[in-house]
Image (tube, grey):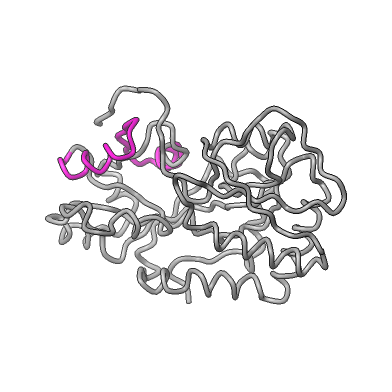
């Protein structure tokens, strides 16, 4: 199994995560203060428009009069989580994929998956010259004979290995594309939310998406709220529950992501399902109305 030696922490391009927050002063909110929503400056987040509409929908369904105030930030995700958890932050919430550590950090998770689980839908980048071979991969056992490429500190690496898959790692995001093209790994799983942007403009001409094949594991992107704003966390939960109940959250998600899902259809028998050992036990997997399932509908 190919493994690249560890180097400084990977700078991975996030989808539903936010940059580092500015620290320094306690920012406990007063009643009626606006909802300070982060806006990435140097690396615009393609999900920001959708997330803002989700927050607006939740506040509306909760009967809230709070207004959204964008705050420009340009820093890294790990520090963002720390600062938000301490309440020393110029913003009130962030959105990112949940795990046990994040939910135990002091942040207030609103446990409604605003992505409806799409971050766990993984398409496979492979070498274009080997596309015919990938049409014959139908099981995890067959996939386990091949080597996946991942970042050495990505949670996906833990998930893949926990399911018996081989993983070769790198400390560099861009290096993984080069490793795949050079034959040092056999495939590179990418979220359905990010793969089109990564392949746009013929950036990786030697690579292609394996046809009609997907890895799927349960995961959720939540709104995480500062402990200084329990009022906001409560309103968002009330509003999102109401939006799920009346179908407006599902309609907003379909409006935003429907074309993407149509662009990458996968039949049910070509979805390889994985378990996720990082998922907190409070994740509402039993509520089917909160999730989309690949290969269904």
Residue at 47% of width from left, 57% of height from top? 46
- Residue 228 vs 223, above or below: the answer is above
Residue at 52% of width from left, 50% of height from top? 16
Residue 99: give x, y in percent of width and height: 59, 41
Inspect the magenta stretch and tell me whether residue 264 lies in it: no
Which quarter of the picture shows residue 57?
bottom right
- Residue 70 vs 90, above or below: the answer is below
Inspect the magenta stretch and tell me whether residue 176 lies in it: yes
Which quarter of the picture shows residue 241?
bottom right
Residue at 83% of width from left, 68% of height from top? 63
Residue 295: give x, y in percent of width and height: 43, 69
Q: Quadrant of the N terminus?
A: top left
Determine whether, in the image, residue 275 is placed left or right of residue 226. Answer: left
Which quarter of the picture shows residue 56?
bottom right
* Nearest the eye: 44 or 175: 44
Residue 129: give x, y in percent of width and height: 12, 55
- Residue 54 vs 103, above or below: the answer is below
The residues colored magenta run 158-183
Residue 292: give x, y in percent of width and height: 53, 66
């Amino acid at each position: 199994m190919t493994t690249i030696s560890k180097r400084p922490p990977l700078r991975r391009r996030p989808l539903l995560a936010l940059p580092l927050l500015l620290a320094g002063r306690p920012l406990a909110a007063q009643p009626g203060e606006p909802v300070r929503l982060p806006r990435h400056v140097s690396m615009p987040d393609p999900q920001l428009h959708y997330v803002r509409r989700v927050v607006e929908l939740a506040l509306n369904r909760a009967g809230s009069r709070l207004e959204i105030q964008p705050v420009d930030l340009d820093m890294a995700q790990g520090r963002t989580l720390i600062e938000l958890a301490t309440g020393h932050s110029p913003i009130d919430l962030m959105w990112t994929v949940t795990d046990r550590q994040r939910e135990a950090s002091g942040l207030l998770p609103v446990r409604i998956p605003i992505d409806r689980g799409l971050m766990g839908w993984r398409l496979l980048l492979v070498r274009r010259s080997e596309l015919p071979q990938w049409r014959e991969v139908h099981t995890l056992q067959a996939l386990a004979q091949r080597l996946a490429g991942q970042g050495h500190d990505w949670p996906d690496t833990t998930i893949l290995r926990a399911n018996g898959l081989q993983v070769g790692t790198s400390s560099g995001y861009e290096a993984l594309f080069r490793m795949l093209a050079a034959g040092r790994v056999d495939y590179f799983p990418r979220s359905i939310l990010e793969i089109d942007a990564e392949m746009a403009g013929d950036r990786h001409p030697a690579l292609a998406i394996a046809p009609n094949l997907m890895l799927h594991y349960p995961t959720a992107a939540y709104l995480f709220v500062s402990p200084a704003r329990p009022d906001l966390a409560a309103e968002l939960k009330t509003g999102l529950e109401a939006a799920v109940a009346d179908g407006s959250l599902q309609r907003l998600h379909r409006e935003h992501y429907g074309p993407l899902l149509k662009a990458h259809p996968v039949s049910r028998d070509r979805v390889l399902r994985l378990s996720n050992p990082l998922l907190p036990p409070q994740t509402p997997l039993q509520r089917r109305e909160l999730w989309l399932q690949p290969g269904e509908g």
